[in-house]
Image (cartoon, helix red, strand yellow):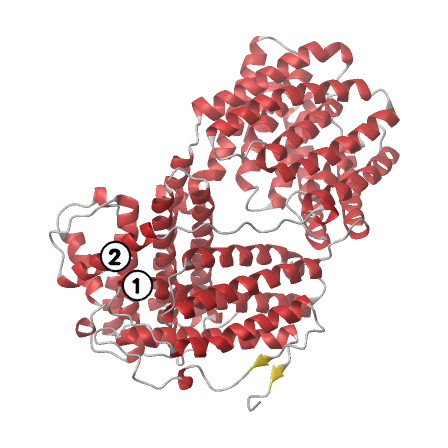
Amino acid sequence: MWDRLAASDPGLLRLTAGLRTVTAIALTLAVLALLRVPVPQLVAGAMTAMVATFAIQEKQRSGQAVTLALGLPVALASMSLGTLLNQRVVVGDVFFVVLIFCAVYGRRFGDRGTALGLVGFQIYFLSLFVHAAPSALPALYGVIAVAFASSAAARFVLLPRTPAGTLDRLRRAFRARLGQLITAQIELLDAGTEDREKVLEHLRTGTARLHETALMIQGRLEDGPLDEATARLLQRRIADAEVAAERLGLLLLTSRSAERTDTLTLHLPGALLPPGGDLPVGDEATAVLRRDLEALRLLVLRPAGEASGTALSQVRNRLLGYREEENLPKAAPAVQDVFRGLGEAARAVLGLRVALDGPQDESDDTPATARSREELDAEDAAIESSEEDEPAKAEPTGLGRPTTRAAVQVAVGSSLAIVGGELLSSQRWYWAVLTCWIVFINTASTGEILVKGYRRLVGTVLGVVAGIGLAGLVGQHTWTAFALVLVFVFAMFYTAPLSYTLMSFFVTAMLGLLYTLLNTYSASVLVLRVEETALGAACGVIAAAVVLPVDTDRRTNELLVDVLTELADVTRGAVDQLSGGPPDDLVDKARDLDQALADLRAATQPLTHPVSPLRSRRDTARYVVALLETCAYHARSLAATAELLPTHPSIAADPRLRGAGRRIVHNIEAIGAHVADPRSAERIETGPSIASMLEPGTLRTPRYGRVTDRVLRHLQRLDESVSGLARPLGVTREPSGK
């Protein structure tokens, strides 16, 4: 059960965020209850504790402490100004807009600037929400101080979260998700014709979730507690395991299909698996594969400290033996490929176990296992000796800087929201401003803001319905209402990364309870909340569309160019190294490609969202992203193979691969040039297959001839996928005879 929880919430980040915020609020309420403060101040304390806890996102504890200490005077100043200026409508509104501009602009200064801006805005909003009066300021200062102290106690004493602990939980999550992916691969063995689509979807989901966890680990390694050499080693082992698991799934799909499965099947939702194949359900080879896949899952999930006896060693030795041609069972070529994939996956898991659990007992090693260990040790030595600093990328300046543009946009949108909100209600106009502020958080294009505004409106409408029902049930039972508030706060933070609509639902339901506590509840108030939310979202969209607009097409094109640039870099570096060139840090380049692709995937959500009326554009966007994910898989695989070259006598470099890869890199760059400038005269080259460009047989090595076959297959699939991008992106093909 713990593994399932770890897999569903990598690093337990959502669980920790929810529990820490609830604990801070509960501590605040307990202290304030002992002081017998009135209910409005209880509400102010609860909301301040929530803001002080969730606003701080720095990874190092020392940085968190400094930001929390700086946040207290910011909160006190914001509460004072909000209380005093609330009586002066024009001056107060102008200051609110200036505060909003500064809070958004502060994001350019990193996590600390973002946190202090968030505290300043939210506490000013809180002063309006509780109708703070100047006479109550001394008491409110005490309430805010108690809330910040409770937040510090929850963060540093009761529920501490260290970078080392977070990284350790993320590693456990990677193991759990890798085990779940292998479970989905086992299901594929037994899937009948009617179950194929469902199992294939499980396989896609498992592959995507494993990739997501690998990216999260990469993000934590950059500022984590490990030294650079150890972090690079762990990054390499995570990448190896991910590539090996994805390749094993593809080989299984091919063995269950009547024809070689295209990698696009793993990445394009709705793609079907042709029936047939060399591995029918109930076959003897299927039973052996099921046994060995279950053994591989055992190796993944069982840490070294929990293993006893020799059973696990025997399982490991059997799986690693499949890396030797003489140990492969007699079967069809596609089925033998699956067993080879099992051997490579077992090697990747062995490297992962060593990286996560430290040195292993080698007394029961077979010759095949010993060779695998020697390869891993040689790779470790090569990783420790190669350290390079990447040049910093140039940042845009002036209005081209995203934070400056967003600050101007949200200031204009908030001004519109204040005017419109005052027309709807002179008492609760600030809800429109809050929505306008929120829809600009973590968005970069008009389309993203539109989708976020839509989701917030849907969640608010549903939350209003729940709030009306809960308010009637709770009545004047103060502590029952606060207990439900704690439940909703936890649910809000636990579901926030999963569904913005759900988070908005819990926020609105919680506000209904707070209105009840403040004796300002009525159905008309919650309906007004919906109206103000719709108004704020509309003002945000208008501001984004009119003031320094970044439309979705422009944003996605910029990110598409970034993805293609990173793809060309990885491919060029991998092919160059496989051709005998100097070693390069291909794992870092591959992760840069993955991050660029993740950014593109997020930016295309407005195009692929179900509410989008442009069905053809939606299908095209999904197809292009799936093709790019296919390209990224093959580029990662080439990079992983190239990284083995310096330390593996079984893999030999061949200069002719450089010529075969030149066309692929040229085509990637030509597509990137066309996306950046549709008037570009660049064309993609076509011609014979990659394999036919090389003389057969000469690339084979004495013991692992299949390795080069794998390189050629990845190059061929990458070439086909890159060429496939030309049609939906409108890139002209150069005649093959030219």
Q: Residue at point 56% right, 24% down?
A: 68
Judged from the image, the secondary structure of the residue bearing numbered disc 1 is helix
Alpha-carbon neighbours of circle 2 within 10 Å: few (<14), some, or many (≥20)? Answer: some
Quarter of the rendering occupied by the N terminus: top left
Q: Quadrant of residue 485?
A: top right
Depth check, front residue: 468 or 592: 592
State the image coordinates of residue 23 (x, y, percent, origin top left). 50, 25
Q: Amino acid at mark 2?
A: Ala
Say whether residue 574 is left or right of residue 95.
Answer: left
Alpha-carbon neighbours of circle 1 within 10 Å: few (<14), some, or many (≥20)? Answer: some
Judged from the image, the secondary structure of the residue bearing numbered disc 2 is helix
Say whether residue 180 is left or right of residue 471.
Answer: left
In this figure, which residue is indicated by the disc labeled 2? 378
Q: Residue at point 37% right, 40% down?
A: 226
Q: Amino acid at mark 1?
A: Pro
State the image coordinates of residue 545 (x, y, percent, origin top left). 79, 52
In this figure, which residue is indicated by the disc labeled 1? 646
Q: Answer above or below: position of 259 versus 487.
A: below
Depth check, front residue: 378 or 421: 378
Sequence-first tag of 2 and 1? 2
CB within 8 Å, label 2 to label 1: yes
